[in-house]
Amino acid sequence: MQHINRRKFIQQSTLAGMGLLIQTKGFAQDFPSVRVSADKRNFSSLAIEATISRMKTQIKDPELAWLFENCFPNTLDTTVHFKKKNDRPDTFVITGDIHAMWLRDSTAQVTPYLSLMKEDAALQQLIAGVINRQTECILIDPYANAFNDGAGKSEWMSDHTDMKLELHERKWELDSLCYTVRLAYNYWKLTNDTSVFDEKWLKAAQSIIATCREQQRFNGVGKYRFGRTTSWSTDTVPGNGLGNVTKPNGLIHSIFRPSDDATVYPFLIPANLFAVVSFRQIAEIATKVYKNAGFAKECQDFANEVDAAIKKHAVITHPKFGKIYAMEVDGFGNCLLQDDANVPNLMSLPYLGAVKASDPIYQNTRRFVLSDSNPYFFKGKAAEGVGSPHTLVNQIWPLSIIMRAMTSTDDKEILQQLKILKNTHANTGFMHESFDKDDAAKFTRKWFAWANTLFGEMILKVVKERPHLLKNML
């Protein structure tokens, strides 16, 4: 797949252009294979194939079962590159149509496979390799969000920041570091394997805490700055590369969102809530694996400090919805009220373990996010859902539809999201970055592994918790 800018223009998808011969009539009878052929897949797992076979018997709707078969293994089929490095597993994971490894995306792409590791030792090794590679990435530069596979030449080498040859991009996104902790922690909890927790991982964890401490900016602005020569405003940073002015208050600055767009107010609340979870997970690992009580206490104290700052500065009273979480604040009393489809976002907080789905503030926030009070909630002829400034207006992201289903406790709402996803893949058999609210055939990124694999994770969750929905849906 040719290398492209992540901010890709909207393309018109056609059946001929995608090379598919899907009939709009008789759809339920014949679904041609759109997976990479078995001999060309980057990684094969018997546990994954067995899961696909099992799910096809539990999903009554043949089109939805076909979507699962295509999407769930997409990361393994097309994006992972596994090898041994110094006798340790090492896995580089591209995002899809961009040949670079994002810390966030690589975690999200392999997370749905964690529960199958005990059935497949090779799959466990592959995921351990992702953790090891992420550790190496953090030790190269904790401020970078995306990496090359070794030293290379990024198209962003001219950015006004401290670029290294190993970096694809150097946008400081707080959630990137949190995702690496999430993967290592959940891998450990499911396998009891501590081999990934070597001295390098501890050093990387200490770097995570030090970097986040620096970005509280109590002792100056820190060493990170970013600028880009571009006409796209959200691709560069105001304030001489530091972001808009803030008043330090215990929250952590995130100069970019998980969409890779610059924040308006650098205290990005979903990322800070995610950080609280991550710091507590590091504390547990430090205690039980490294027997390092001092570092564990440092992480736990930091988590409590950020948690207190969130409660004090991130909750606002909305005139219609009551107490809700702002998406961004600046410490001066200003806030940004919206949500973005990229995770972590306000919608995803229960999924990340940051709040309970029943939490009243979250429920109020959720009602806000799914209303016309959120400027990036779009409703059209094709679907309704949350978009992102990354793709401008009227573009709905399947990530938001999937996450809405994964954080819902209502059968009717979940079923509605399943039907939307079934009806908006534009006859491709895969999820996309975004699609036009009135015409799903107008979409961005036909190869976006995060969305594909998260779709598979959602289907697994529904089968486990609400199997009646998939047994009856047509």
Image: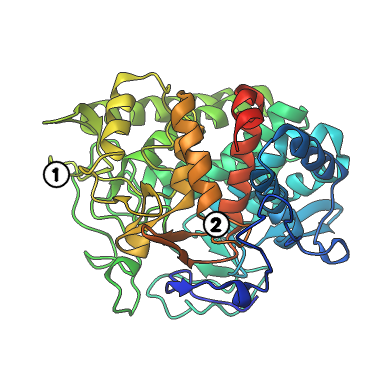
* Sequence-earlier tag: 1 or 2: 1
Q: Is residue 382 left or right of residue 151?
A: left
* Residue that appears at 83% across and 67% down: 40
What element does badge 1 sit on?
loop
Give the residue at x 39% y 37%: 347
Task: Give the amino acid at mark 2.
Answer: His
* Closer to us: 422 or 126: 422
Which of 211/396 is in front?
396
Residue identified by numbered label 2: 425
Q: Give left or right: position of 368 versus 141.
A: left
What mark, if any, has residue 334 been given in the picture?
1
Other residues around mark 1 within 10 Å, as few (<14) / some (14–19) / many (≥20): few
x, y percent for residue 6: 48, 69
**Amino acid type assigned to the residue bearing label 1 in the image:** Asn
Find residue 472 and report its horizontal and vertical position in percent.
62, 29
Image quarter where the C terminus lies is top right
